[in-house]
Amino acid sequence: MSDQVRGLVITFFGVLFVVPDSLFVRLIDAEALTIAFWRLFLVGLGTSIWLLTREGTAPFRGVLRTGHLGLIYMIGVGASGLLFILAVSLTSVANVVFIIASLPVFAAIFSRIFLAEPFSVRTLMTIAAVVPGLAIIAYGSGETKNASLVGDILAFGVSALYAAALTAARQARATSMVPGMAMGCLLAGLFIAPFAAPLSVPTSEVPLVAAHAGFILFSSVLLAIGPRYIPSAEVGLLVLLESVLAPVLAWVVVGENPGPYAVLGGGIVIGALFVSNLLLLRRQL
């Protein structure tokens, strides 16, 4: 098996494992903060055990040596994980995943501000197409059942925070930030623990909570490995699958209709990002 095929397969399954993320939030009978605590804590703990077993403490010390870059990454990952759960609990799954799909736009803006990377014509055209799509989604929150502007704003926060984390990771590209993800999740989980009620989860919900954390853990590991073998544009194209499949899964399983505004706005966002990544892929090949 070639490196490219290996990378495509690993990344593809990494994306598939993250697709049910928002659905688990809908299915688990617990408060949003409690769900967030267990998701963050178990994912952080599981990733830490995996890394400690494979490489010891060296990777963690490597992240800490990056100073403020590692701190930004940990805060971005941990805070975005918390806001994701809150966003899904307040607005529709479709709105959340379509808004989060705009992450490359925030990443491009942050790279321009903090890394002095110029905007390409492709990036500017992508931003020009994505912004109206996001505006349509936000407008529809007042017209669509299960959607709310507050949840949409939190989803924008997820996108911006994770983009900031990725920008910090790019600046410290010599260091693997997977341990930073583990530490960020653990710290965020411990931070919200006093405000959550971790032990209030009914016994009947424990398998769902464990499955939720397991899916995200596997996804995190696979998405940390797969993109090393394939171009970033291929990663971007595969990640768009989650934005398409997650609302469909929520619609099929819990009957959550995304509404016409989310479908239209999301279609514009996903379409613009698809074309942008396709053009980038052609350039990289």
Image (cartoon, helix red, strand yellow):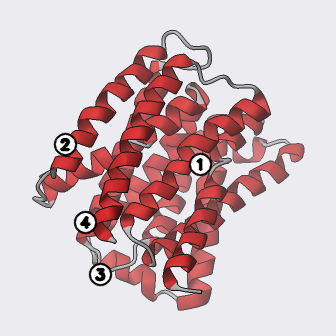
C-alpha distance separating marks 2 and 1: 41 Å
The answer to whether the residue labelled 1 contacts the one labelled 3, judged by CB atoms less than 8 Å apart, is no
Q: Secondary structure at mark 1?
A: helix
Marks 2/4 in contact by CB < 8 Å: the verdict is no
> Sequence order check: which comes first, mark 1 or mark 4?
4
Residue 22 horizontal/vertical position (percent)? 63, 41
The dot on residue 124 is 2
Three-letter amino acid code of the residue under disc 3: Ala
Question: Label 3's element?
Answer: loop
Tags 4 and 3 touching, CB below 8 Å: no
The answer to which of marks 4 and 3 sits earlier in the sequence is 4
According to the picture, the residue beneath numbered tag 1 turns out to be: 193
Q: Are marks 3 and 2 in contact (CB under 8 Å)?
A: no
Task: Tell me, yes or no, if residue 7 can be seen here.
Answer: yes
Residue to which mark 4 is pinned: 68
The residue wearing badge 3 is 174
Residue at image point 51% right, 29% down: 95
